[in-house]
Image: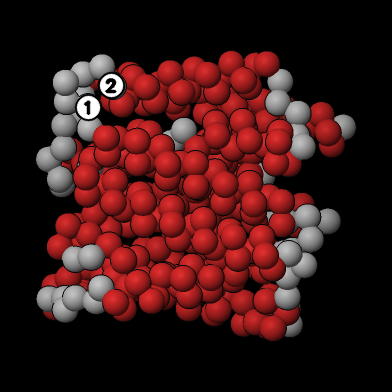
Amino acid sequence: MQARAKQNTTLGILLMLGTALLFSLQDGISRHLAQEYNVWMVVMIRFWAFALFALALASRGPGGIGTALRSHMPGLQFLRGAALIIEVCVIILAFVKLGLIETHAVFVCYPLIVAGLSGPILGEKVGWRRWAAIGVGFVGVIVILDPGSGVFSPWAVIPLASAFLFALYGLLTRYVAQTDTAATSFLWAGLVSALLITPLGLWFWQPMTGADWGWMGILCLTGSLAHFLMIRAYEVAEASDIQPFALLQLVFIAALGVWIFHETLRPNVILGGALVIAAALFTLWRARLAAQRAKA
């Protein structure tokens, strides 16, 4: 009864919008730093901050860090962390090679990949309507990639690989949630990611200017704050009610790309992105209906 009393959908939407804005700023700063320094080092420092944030949250929970570390599926938790850190490295590389706008226009298809893989991985039923939406979404991806044009770049498939990795991370998160708490999954993701990226980051260490250390500090701060807002959003509202608002990150990214990085918003990216977002929203709506029927 206490959890129900705390439900506040309006607050959850505002928190999710704040999360999307902060993640957009984080991606913009990541692109700036990755243009000047090695991607491995930038991601390593970012995930050091993430791991410290996860440890701080776990220490305040019931039983402290020791309880949060106890997992019934440690192998899958490790695989989750590995998928997350590889996904982040891949998408930051895409930011540098393609830009923020085109990367996120493709990446936003990850809910469609989650829907498509939820059957074989989680045993969930995916009806023809959601399969149709998945098909429309991937038509949108093809429109964005524009493989028939003379300017098509092989780098364009990188954000699609990142979307697959993030979808795998999300599916594994849902799978381990059968036995592990959210605090356990959050802590494992932070620690495993930091552990795996540290050897590479230290190997490719580069000295940074004082100004860029300032940007790195802002990157770590926005990342930690974004995760905190996201956790609070899911605490006060149903995930199905607020998840569609996370897609507004693409709007924030487009603004950053055009105004800060002087990227071009091409017509095929606008059209393809609209198809992908429409398909993702429809898929999330159908998933919500299925969850409501299951509760009934």
**Place of residue 238 in the rendered image (x, y in percent of width and height, measured from the top left):** 66, 44
State yes or no: discs 1 and 2 in contact (Cβ < 8 Å). Answer: yes
Q: Residues within 10 Å of mark 1 (few under 14, many from 20)?
A: few
**Place of residue 258 in the rendered image (x, y in percent of width and height, measured from the top left):** 17, 38
Q: Nearer the viewer, residue 40 or 32?
A: 40
Give the side of residue 65 with respect to residue 256, left or right.
right
Residue matched to label 1: 152
Report the residue at 12% width, 40% height from top. Answer: 262
Disc 2 on helix, strand or loop? loop
Q: Is residue 183 above or below residue 4?
A: below
Q: Residues within 10 Å of mark 2 (few under 14, many from 20)?
A: some
Report the residue at 67% width, 37% height from top. Answer: 118
Amino acid on which disc 1 is placed: Phe
> Which numbered marker is on residue 146?
2
Q: Is residue 103 above or below residue 265?
A: below
Q: Nearer the viewer, residue 140 or 198?
A: 198
Residue 8 visible? The answer is: no
